Amino acid sequence: MNYKVNIINGPNLNLLGEREQSQYGTQTFEDLKKICIKKSEELGLNLKFSQSNIEGEIVNLIQDSIKNFDGIIINAAAFTHTSVAIRDALSVFKKPIIELHISNIYKREEFRRKSLISDVVTGGIFGLGADGYILAIISMQKLLKK
Ligand code: DQA
């Protein structure tokens, strides 16, 4: 069976490669998407790679995943630190969820050190750059195979 995984990216991640390269590296969003799809195919996962700058759209993507996906990998970006709505939607998803951050949010400004979603996800990856996406895909496949 091909498991279906939704990678959900929050605000400004569409600007990867252009924004704050010292934090987020030089890889563009489109390149990252291609690499993630390739890795997922290798591992027999069916991947959707989505992005939105709008909080309510991210809530909709999570709600849609409840019926249609086996796992969620989420980089909620700035909404990680502010969104009760995204946290509440994730709480309804009873399958594996991996929280992901490209930068080490615990080494940055005070306001980034608080994640509203960490305690409702299965596990997390942060501070490992864009490679974190590949690691999250590998971990998700292992979680789903169990
Ligand atoms: C981020 C960290 C967030 O604090 C920030 O708002 C982002 C990206 C990361 O991937 O490191 O947009 O989630």
Image: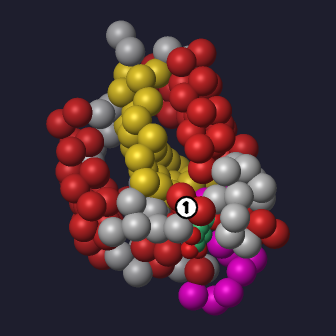
Q: Give the residue at x 49% y 15%.
A: 44
Between residue 34 and residue 99, name the one nearer to us: 34
> Can you name the residue that lies furthest to the bottom here?
110
x, y (%) of residue 129?
74, 54
Whether residue 102 is in magenta: the answer is yes
Q: Where are the magenta residues, as a range? A: 101-111
Residue 25 lies in magenta, yes or no? Answer: no
Q: Is residue 106 left or right of residue 83?
A: right
Label 1 sits on residue: 13
Residue 142 locus on image (x, y percent): 54, 26
Residue depicted at 53% across the width and 67% down the height:
12
**What kind of colouring is applied to the model shown?**
secondary structure
Secondary structure under the numbered disc 1 in the rendered image: helix
Q: Residue at x 45, y 41 (%)?
A: 49
User: What residue occupies the far top of the structure in this picture?
Assistant: 1
Q: Residue at x 46, y 21 (%)?
A: 45
* Ligand 1 has an atom within 8 Å of the beta carbon of the residue at disc 1: yes
Residue 139, above or below 81: above
Quadrant of residue 70 within the rendered picture: top left
Q: Position of residue 74 (x, y in %)?
A: 46, 53
Give amino acid for label 1. Answer: Leu
